[in-house]
Every structure is written in C-alpha cells, then in structure tokens.
Image (spheres, rainbow, N blue to C red):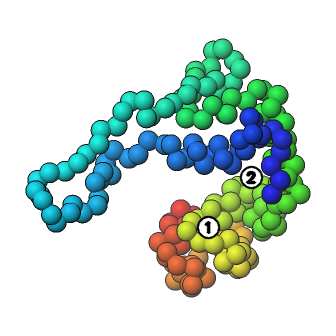
Amino acid sequence: MIIPNLFRRQSVSFLCCLAACCLSMTPNPKRRRNTRHRKETGDRNKTSKRKRDSSEQKSVTVRSTNDPGTPDIPTSCPFHNFSVLEVAELRGSLLGWYDQHQRQLPWRDIAKADGDPNQKAYAVWVSEIMLQQTRVTTVIEYYKRWMKKWPTVEDLARASIEEVLQVWAGLGYYQRARRLHEGA
C-alpha cells in the first residue's frame, strides 16, 4: 500500500501515528488492574501498586478544523492537525484509491443503480445483517440466493419463517434471519 506524502509529517508516518494513538488510549476503568499472581514468598497482604504520575498521561489538544468556532478535540497525537486543503486532498486521494481498487460486491451494484430507494434500502439492509460476524466471501453466495428468492421486502414479508431459515441455513446466527423476517 502506498501512503501519500500527505501522511508524512516530521518523518512519522500516518500508520505509526495511528498506532501510537491507539496504544495511548486511556484504559477501561472497570478492567482489573492487577491480574498477575502474587509471589508465594513473603507477606501475602503486601501488594506493590504503582500510582500513575499525571505527567505519564500526555494529551495534546488540536483543532478539528481551522474554523475558530469549532471546539478543540483532545488527542494524544499532535499529527492530526490537518488544514482544510490537506483534508480535501486526503479525501480525494482515498476516494480515488477506492474507485480503482474496490471489490465488486452484489449489494453495491444495487445501491449504485438509479432505481427505487426502497429497493436500495432493502438490499443494503439485507447485506448489513448478513455481514454481521460473517466473512464477505461467505456472504456473497447467500446474498445472491436471498435476493433471487426475495427481491423486495414485500416478497420477504410473504415468505414463511421456515423458508427464510432454509435459505439462511449454513450462515449461522439464525436470529438474524428471524429479525429480518420480522422486520419485513
């Protein structure tokens, strides 16, 4: 993958910056802090807990846009302060890459077609439900079968739950199919 020059700032790449930001996120306060077992020797009541110094949690505040009326957004990475021009260039670069390298997926074809918005919404709805916790390559064939059998939400509403579950068979998480049928 080629990273545009826009991501390069002071010899730190966007991916390194992203990783640093993800690693410096504050931990979940409900998570157990001391999960290691105490040593069997010595006093069992003693624990060595190190208190965090306030200087360890560094946070930088950056502007979300160049508009002075926009509130500042706290971040641990100072490299997020893009100008409006840089944002436009980045957006154009990303969308250009997507146009060249996007995967051909059946639900995208339906969504692109100039047709009934209800049909588009139904196609996207079915694909999103099928894609929950399921690989795209697995979903494609199920999606094609589903849309061939029930091309509209009205067709799905007229189907029996047994038919729906039969077409869904093998995809797993059958509650998704039941909810699609109920929603129709």
Q: Whole-percent x and y of residue 85?
A: 82, 28
Image-quadrant location for residue 5? top right
Q: Is residue 5 visible?
A: yes
Image-quadrant location for residue 37? bottom left
At 19% from the left and 50% from the top, the residue drawn is 47
User: Which comes before the other along the chain, label 1 or label 2?
Assistant: 2
Find residue 51 and name its label: none
Q: Is residue 150 visible?
A: no
At 25% from the left and 45% from the top, the residue drawn is 49
Label 2, residues with CA under 10 Å away: few <14, some 14-19, many ≥20: few
CB under 8 Å between discs 1 and 2: no
What residue sits right under mark 2 in the picture? 117
- Find the residue positioned furthest to the top: 68
Amino acid identity at mark 2: Pro
Q: Marks 1 and 2, how far apart in space? A: 21 Å
At 68% from the left and 29% from the top, the residue drawn is 81
The answer to which of 174 and 151 lies nearer the viewer is 174
What secondary structure is marked by label 1?
A: loop
Q: Whole-percent x and y of residue 145?
A: 70, 79
What secondary structure is marked by label 2?
A: helix
